Image (spheres, rainbow, N blue to C red):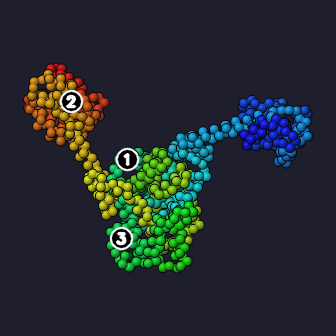
């Protein structure tokens, strides 16, 4: 439009009545929107000359002319104050010509204003691009104005670095809530706490973890691993108040874990341990839900479910089995073009529930969900019982922390950001504490819901909090419809969730993994399924540590960790060691060169390797110039070596220790130099060392 104005203005120096491109058109003839756009730029660049009608007033009916003292901005404000009818009259006059305008003196041509409009539009476009570029790196101070001030302190500093806009965040929250609704109900049912507890868990843990957590795009709610532990808690403590007290205690423990900066510990867990653990969780979920999909009870534990499964296969409820198969078809094979962007779990849930209600199928169903606000669940006033609940609460807290931080890593990879592990633990703890107080299921970072949230544009806590608000509204309005939901439909949804939890990418590479790593994965998997979740993680972690230290000790005992030089292999020695061996008598001197990290895993092995080689020599030199770390065990073994050399009437020298070496202070405090002939471990390795 601006280019057209400029072109016509330049090609038509004079126009007759009725032409809107007359060279006599001025800023006073422009609509208010264009004048408002032009005014700031024109005022700043000084290109708009003030113009005044002969009478110093209006040029024509319905317009206010620029006076000699009026700035363009003042003109825009005065034009805005006119009535809509007057402005319409002015615009019609602009298009149809006016005798008053013909009588007015010549002022700025419209071509100049077209150039100003182009400059103003370019400035606004550049400003918008600048704001979009800075959105990815914005801090909390650059978040929306409504979230500044005291409320902004609730959010992590990274919460709004990828802020898009309110509409996108709210839309992502609504979409995620649609996906979370059937999953929250399903996990609540499979744990034995109930569908309402699952929904309350998604509402309260999701809302407060979003506000106080350290992963802005993460969505929290009941998950498969948390449902497995909750099932054990429900089976052990039938009293609901005790069950939800365990949830609240687990939340408090997660807060303490975050305050103690334990969030980074997840990075110390080997991948094979995590893979075996998550695969075991998937196996537990699938084994518990297979009998339910056949119309029978899962038994609450893997052993019981495996005992029930043959009987369930022999006498299945055909209606339940048909609904389960239909649900799996909807989840895996239903064409995407027919979903209309509605999540498949929700489509399957609605379709199965409608068929069950309309056809009157005799299948186990969920039952109606009580409507209304949640009631407070007070903990039992029994100190002995609370003390007995601590191990169970710790299991739930540790599992929730691992599950949440793994999901945080997924969110980081999708959003190209980095989460705050410690703050995330605090947020998860607050969410679970509030959920336990109001009778909610324990929650953790939910991978599938987080992926949906990110893919639909969610980047900040606004989307996660919106997801909880939408679920709360659904509980208040749709609770009575839950009685039509078949349990076999929820079981099929959970089976898919269990299969999604399995670490298929790593399992496909098992044949290429070393045998010790495969053993770690297998031990963790079997103990997760058949023994205990926390014991499985501890066992896999311990086995991985043993494997690591064994490999490290073997590396330290090789040529990359220790070398012994004497007159026989002096030609392969570094230059300083050659000088020492050349200055000594042949066959009487050995130089032991240690490298890298010398820890307790290799200490005893080094002693067994060095004693036969160096004890009996007249002179033994231990070179520490390439050692970066020595622990207490290695230093004590080195001291024992020096004593054995002295007992064999030999002299031992220790040299080359650096002050920045990890363990140097311990080396000095144990007074290792006293056992050395040179009296100082900082001496440099030279030929003069022996003569001195």
User: Within 10 Å of the Cα at label 2, are there few (<14), some (14-19), or many (20+) other Cα atoms?
Assistant: many
Residue 57 appears in the picture as rendered: yes
Query: Which residue is found at the position 12% from the left and 23% from the top?
Result: 584
543, above or below 39, in the image: below
Label ID, residue 623: 2
Query: Which residue is found at the position 88% from the left and 32% from the top?
Result: 105
Query: Where is mark 1, residue-wise?
Result: 267
Q: Nearer the viewer, residue 661 or 517?
A: 517
In percent of width and height, residue 356 lies at 52, 76
Label ID, residue 305: 3
Label 1 residue SS: helix
| Of pointers 2 and 3, the one earlier in the residue sequence | 3
Residue 599 sits in quarter? top left
Label 2 residue SS: strand
| Of pointers 3 and 1, the one earlier in the residue sequence | 1
In 3D space, how far apart are the residues under numbered discs 2 and 1 (Cα atoms)?
Answer: 35 Å
């Amino acid at each position: 439009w601006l280019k057209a104005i400029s072109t016509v203005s330049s090609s038509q120096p004079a126009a007759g009545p009725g032409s809107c491109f007359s060279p006599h058109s001025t800023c006073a003839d422009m609509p208010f929107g264009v004048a408002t756009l032009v005014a700031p730029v024109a005022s700043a660049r000084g290109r708009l000359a003030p113009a005044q009608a002969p009478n110093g007033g209006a040029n024509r009916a319905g317009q206010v002319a620029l006076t000699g003292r009026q700035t363009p901005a003042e003109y825009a404000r005065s034009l805005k104050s006119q009535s809509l009818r007057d402005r319409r009259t002015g615009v019609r006059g602009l298009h149809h010509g006016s005798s008053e305008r013909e009588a007015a003196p010549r002022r700025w041509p419209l071509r100049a204003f077209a150039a100003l409009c182009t400059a103003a539009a370019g400035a606004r476009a550049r400003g918008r691009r600048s704001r979009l570029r800075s959105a990815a790196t914005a801090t909390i101070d650059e978040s929306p104005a409504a979230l500044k001030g005291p409320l902004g302190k609730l959010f992590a500093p990274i919460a709004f670095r990828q802020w898009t806009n309110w509409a996108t965040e709210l839309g992502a929250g609504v979409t995620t809530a649609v996906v979370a609704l059937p999953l929250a109900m399903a996990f609540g049912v499979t744990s034995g706490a109930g569908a309402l507890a699952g929904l309350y868990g998604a509402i309260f843990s999701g809302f407060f973890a979003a506000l106080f957590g350290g992963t802005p795009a993460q969505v929290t709610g009941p998950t498969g691993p948390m449902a497995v532990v909750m099932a054990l808690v429900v089976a052990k403590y039938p009293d609901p108040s005790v069950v939800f007290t365990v949830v609240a205690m687990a939340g408090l423990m997660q807060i303490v874990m975050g305050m103690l900066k334990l969030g980074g510990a997840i990075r110390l867990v080997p991948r094979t341990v995590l893979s075996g653990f998550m695969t075991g969780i998937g196996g537990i979920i699938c084994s518990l839900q297979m009998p339910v999909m056949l119309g029978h009870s899962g038994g609450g534990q893997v052993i019981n479910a495996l005992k029930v499964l043959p009987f369930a296969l022999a006498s299945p409820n055909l209606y339940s089995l048909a609904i389960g198969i239909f649900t799996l078809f909807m989840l895996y094979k239903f064409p995407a073009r027919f979903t209309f962007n509605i999540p498949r779990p929700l489509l399957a849930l609605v379709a199965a529930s409608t068929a069950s209600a309309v056809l009157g199928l005799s299948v186990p169903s969920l039952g109606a969900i009580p409507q209304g606000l949640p009631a407070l669940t007070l903990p039992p006033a029994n100190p002995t019982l609370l003390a007995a609940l601590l191990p169970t609460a710790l299991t739930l807290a540790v599992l929730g922390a691992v599950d949440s931080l793994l999901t945080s890593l997924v969110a980081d990879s999708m959003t190209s950001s980095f989460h705050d592990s410690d703050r995330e633990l605090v947020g998860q703890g607050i969410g679970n504490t509030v959920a336990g107080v109001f009778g909610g299921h324990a929650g953790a970072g939910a991978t599938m819901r987080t992926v949906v949230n990110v893919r639909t544009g969610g980047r900040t806590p606004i989307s996660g909090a919106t997801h909880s608000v939408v679920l709360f509204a659904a509980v208040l309005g749709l609770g009575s419809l839950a009685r039509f939901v078949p349990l076999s439909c929820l079981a099929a949804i959970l089976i898919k969730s269990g299969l999604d939890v399995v670490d298929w990418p790593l399992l496909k590479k098992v044949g290429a993994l070393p045998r010790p790593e495969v053993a770690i994965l297998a031990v963790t998997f079997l103990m997760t399924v058949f023994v205990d979740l926390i014991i499985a993680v501890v066992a896999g972690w311990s086995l991985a540590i043993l494997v690591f230290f064994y490999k490290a000790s073997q590396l330290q005992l090789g040529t990359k960790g220790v070398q012994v030089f004497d007159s026989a292999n002096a030609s392969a020695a570094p230059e300083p060691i050659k000088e020492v061996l050349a200055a000594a008598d042949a066959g009487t001197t050995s130089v032991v060169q240690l490298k890298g990290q010398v820890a307790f895993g290799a200490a005893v092995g080094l002693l067994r390797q060095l004693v036969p080689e160096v004890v009996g020599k007249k002179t033994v030199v231990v070179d520490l110039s390439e050692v970066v770390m020595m622990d207490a065990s290695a230093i004590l073994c080195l001291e024992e070596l020096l004593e054995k050399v002295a007992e064999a009437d030999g002299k031992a020298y220790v040299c080359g220790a650096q002050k920045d070496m990890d363990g140097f202070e311990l080396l000095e405090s144990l007074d290792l130099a006293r056992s050395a002939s040179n009296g100082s471990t900082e001496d440099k390795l030279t030929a003069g060392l022996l003569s001195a």
